[in-house]
Image (cartoon, grey):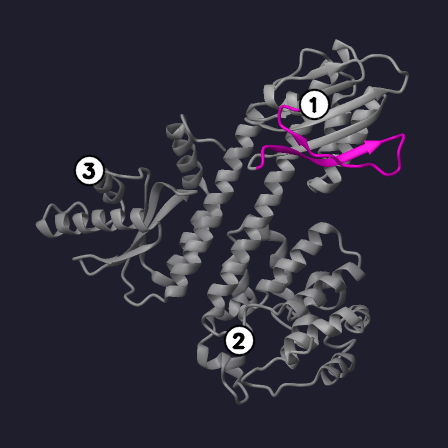
Amino acid sequence: MKTNGGNGQYQKELFERLKKSISLKREEECIGCIIKPAAWWIIEKSNPKFPDLKKAISCHCPYSKNSSSANTNCMKMIFNIIQKAREVKALAKFDCVHGLHGFIYPIMHGEKVYGYIGACYKKKDVAPQIMDVFAAFTDTIVREIQKELELSKLYETVRPRAIALSTVHTVHRLISSTLDLNELLPRIARLSLQIMRANRCSIKLVDSKRKILLPKATVDLRKKNVTLKKVKIGRHAPGRAFKYGRPIRGNDYIAVPLIDEDTIGVITVYDKIDGKAFTQFDQEIMSTMAEQAVIAIKNAQLYKEQERLTMGSIKSLAKVLDTRAPGTYVPRASFLKIALAMGQEMRLDAENMKSLEYAAILHDAGEVVIPYELLTKPSKLTGKEYEIVKSHPMAGVEIIKHMKALKSVMPIILYHHENYDGTGYPKGLKKEQIPIGARIMGVVSAFEAMITKRPYRSVRTISDAIEEIRKNSGTQFDPKVVHVFFTVINRKDVQQALEKELYGHQ
């Protein structure tokens, strides 16, 4: 979303949504349980003046209304910490003269700071990992809000066409039915051919760095093998349509730019089936088609970017957690490969596959709340200690519940220690009561635990671990899932991946 020339409005909308954000409120409650009691406040300016700071904090800090010099010095100190946070663009901690502790975290978009989130609390020693988790979650929440603003701006640019096309609703519904760009663009090309009754359609998107239009989808009804050609901006009909931001029409072609706030590409149709020339009416229809298409394309691009941001946040969180007990939270690529291959074998849809992938990375994130000495205890756990360990699935859900994109991941994390016969935890679910993703993760996580180094268990060979999975089929594990596991584990590529990671074999 462009902010040049509209920074004030953008900033206003950003903070309005941030203050209403349920995810942020829940995050503050969650972190607040660790650093409690805590007073939270938001500063809505990138470079606040001293009165702005006092106004933002006055209704939250119990000492702020005190007019003493100590309180004034405290405010000055916080004011300086804000300047530091703005300069380093990272969380900055402080201790105030009233015996409280706190931190300031900048709210950013790219490299630009728009304001700050701050907290004062009494707990003295807060683990750095907690601050890292807060920063990671806050970044994700802010990015979600920024994407919502981008989508709002995107839809505000759409204006109804003067020409009523009976096919518009059908076109819009069909091209909006997928967020996968590789599926979307050929679908738009085929629809364009049907509406225009033309022989060929090409969709090109811009590579702004190289100043060239790259072919992304071409459908030619007359040829089986289609050659995809690059076009320089300003050259040929597509290049000129892009350069001038308007349709370019000839007797046997129409090139229409895909325009959102900027021109992102061009749709070009060639050669009517009946051999007639393209008309002004055809041009208007294609312009309407392009207006519908650009919404779907931008949504797909934003969705892809959101997926990338979500995966980045998940990996960052796993890395942060892994610093506490290296090797505990970041799964090996081979185990992720096994989990996804099992999901494919069981024909999970794209959404469930994505949830399984996220869960494979974060399924044991809740172990961060378990005392380190329990995680590394080489001897058998006591009953009380085991009950503490059993709390980690619920803790894992508490950690990720603020991320909307991970809502479907929570049941997998929560129930992946449930047993098929109902003897697992935390709810004692059995058979199909356990989500399919959790049943898959139960097998994969057990296999992973057996063949990797753990303080409390000697490493087993792959064959021994497979045999253990077999013995527990029907009790601990779903027999159908175990059958799929055997199918996947016997694949040559999976065996090679395991041997390479575990034993260094190429």
Question: In the picture provided, is 95 more to the left or to the right than 380?
Answer: left
Pointer 1: what residue? 236
* Residue found 75% across the figure and 52% down from its top: 349
Residue 423: in sight, yes or no? Answer: no
Q: 158 or 390, which is in the foreground?
A: 158
> Could you say where residue 322 lies in the image, as x and y percent from the top left?
49, 69
> What amino acid is at disc 3?
Pro
Relative to 308, does residue 152 appear above or below in the rendering? above
**In contact (CB < 8 Å): disc 2 and disc 3:** no
Magenta stretch: give its range: 210-236
In the displayed image of the protein, which residue is found farthest to the bottom?
A: 379
Tag of residue 275 = none
> Could you say where residue 334 lies in the image, as x and y percent from the top left?
67, 69
Q: What secondary structure is marked by label 3?
A: helix
Tag of residue 389 = 2
Q: Of the two numbered discs 3 and 1 on the same chain, state the one appearing first in sequence.
A: 3
> What amino acid is at disc 1?
His
Q: Of the two numbered discs 2 and 3 on the same chain, state the one appearing first in sequence.
A: 3
